[in-house]
Amino acid sequence: MNLYEQVKRINEADYTINRLIYRQYKQHLNSGITTQQAVLLDIVYLAKRITVGEIANEMDISSSAVSQLVGKLEKNKYIKREINIQNRREIFITLAENGQEYFLKQNYVEQQIADKIYSKLTENELHELERILEKLKEISMKELT
């Protein structure tokens, strides 16, 4: 089997796994937000507190585009804006109640996936899978950024 065929089989397996997981847990994951809004939420979640400019750099979009996303997410109580008391021109973005709930649901689904799927692998298989995926991540970051 050549490399292309092998990669295609790996990608198809990954797609099938993700499709099955989504079908099983979509009621927990379907929050009515767009992919771009989900990316913004992930950035805020990891940073805990971040500026619009920092989000724009991370997402590689304009600050005005981020402000539009922030406005929609703020309206739906996923995030909130806080003025920096040291620099009143700077606004920090943090998670609001629906944003916190969004990640609680994600954590629940991740726990379920760990219990129902990954627990069926041996400890050695899990370590090997993690090692390979980390290596692929490193290669991807080097080659694609």
Image (cartoon, rainbow, N blue to C red):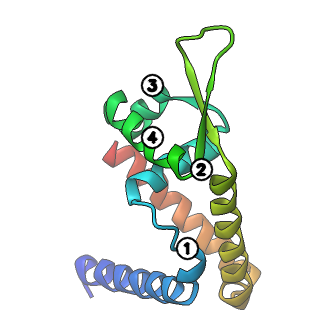
The earlier-in-sequence mark between 1 and 2 is 1
Q: Residues within 10 Å of mark 3 (few under 14, many from 20)?
A: some
**Residue 29 relative to residue 49: left or right:** left
Q: Which mark is residue 29?
A: 1
Q: Which residue lies at the image location 32% right of the left edge and 48% below the top edge?
A: 144
**Which residue lies under the disc numbered 4?**
71
Q: Which residue lies at the image location 71% right of the left edge and 73% below the top edge?
A: 108
Position of residue 122 measured from the top left corner of the image (x, y, whole percent): 73, 86
Amino acid type for the residue under numbered disc 2: Lys
Q: Nearer the viewer, residue 110 or 106?
A: 106
Amino acid type for the residue under numbered disc 4: Gly
Q: Nearer the viewer, mark 2 or mark 3?
A: 2
Position of residue 124 measured from the top left corner of the image (x, y, whole percent): 72, 79
Mark 2 in CB contact with mark 3 (< 8 angstroms):
no
Cα distance in 3D space between marks 1 and 2: 17 Å
Cα distance in 3D space between marks 3 and 1: 28 Å
Cα distance in 3D space between marks 3 and 4: 15 Å
**Which residue lies under the disc numbered 2?**
77
